[in-house]
Image: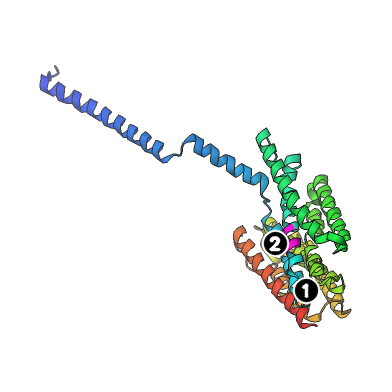
Amino acid sequence: MARKPRCVGQVDNWAFARWGAIVSVLNSANLHLQSQAISAPPADAATEKARRERRRALIVPREHGAWGLLLVPMVTGAGVAFHQASHIFPLILLLTAALALFWLRTPLENLLGTTAMRAQSVEESHTLRSVIVMLAAVAGIALAFLLWAGRNADLWPLGATVAVAFIAQAILKKISRRTRMLSEMVGIIGLTASAPAAYYVITGQFDDRAWMLWLANILFAGDQIHYVQLRIHTAKIQGFRAKLAHGWAFALGQAIMTAIITVACIARQMPAIASLAFAPLLFRGWFYFVQEPTQLVVRRLGWSELKHATAFCVLLIAAFILAR
């Protein structure tokens, strides 16, 4: 059967329709590319943003929990000491030196290349050296005023103990992944030394209270770190027996902490009422083994531990003050 020829008008209409569809698609694609070009940041801006974020990571300490492990003991030491004396200027100097030295560790480690994050260019190395010099100068000036003319002489042996603790922590981290938890516990000794240091610079005495404040903060911080690690590594484990099988070391730590607190209170080295400061911590730890399984949200866990730290500060300070 012969095809019926199209007339000229029909061919033109078909051709225009075809090319009109193609032009429409091309125009849509062009508009899409233009909108992407407008919404996407320029390459230079994106590169500069990435550079700023990397510079921040090289300079600013990433262990957010470690800030709390440093400041919570200092608050407890100062809170108890201010009930006996009101020398605030030495505390300001100690706080400045402690924060500068703690901050100094991150750029120093990144410059030396002892961590995964390290300087990769001459510019980054220069930036790290500048920050290190600035932080070292701030810490040096604060310590010079604090130790001027033989004042606060007991800070020297305390500082030596802190230095040994941090060196031991670095060595344990390098040995094996199995010693990382032990390294964290050793590092706690150095961080929590801010409690007796704050108490000492305010009162001028390094007595039994200073030692007990140090011990209390070591126990608290050690339990807190162990609990957080336990929750992270057993997030998908359910049932009392399964939790106990994986968390027996934490349960043993809770029992040892309870025994140490009991002995200290019986020996009257620590006020008996101070045991109440550990009650929320112990309840939280034991309750973990019997609570219903819930989805782990790390941020929520962090806020929960911050609340426990705040409660510990308030209760421990109140206990030492009321026991006078």
Q: Observer-nearest residue: 144 or 235?
A: 144
Quadrant for the C terminus, please.
bottom right
Which residue does the image show at 22% across and 28% down from the upper left? 20
* Relative vertical location of residue 194 with respect to residue 18 in this rendering, above or below: below
Q: Is residue 168 left or right of residue 281?
A: right
Instruction: Look at mark 1 in the image and give the residue it sits on.
Output: 81
Q: Is residue 209 magenta?
A: no
Q: Is residue 96 left or right of residue 293?
A: right
CA distance for labels 2 and 1: 19 Å
Q: Quadrant of residue 1?
A: top left
Q: Is residue 166 visible?
A: yes
**Image position, residue 143 (x, y; %):** 79, 57
Which residue does the image show at 74% across and 75% down from the upper left? 317
Which residues, given as a range, are shown in magenta? 92-96
User: Foreground mark, 2 or 1?
Assistant: 1
SS for dot 2:
helix
Which residue does the image show at 86% across and 53% down from the upper left? 164
Image disc number at residue 68: 2
Image disc number at residue 89: none
Q: Is residue 227 visible?
A: no
Amino acid carrying label 2: it is: Gly
**Image position, residue 273 (x, y; %):** 77, 81
SS for dot 1:
helix
Q: Choose the circle earlier in sequence order: 2 or 1.
A: 2
**Image position, residue 194 (x, y; %):** 78, 63
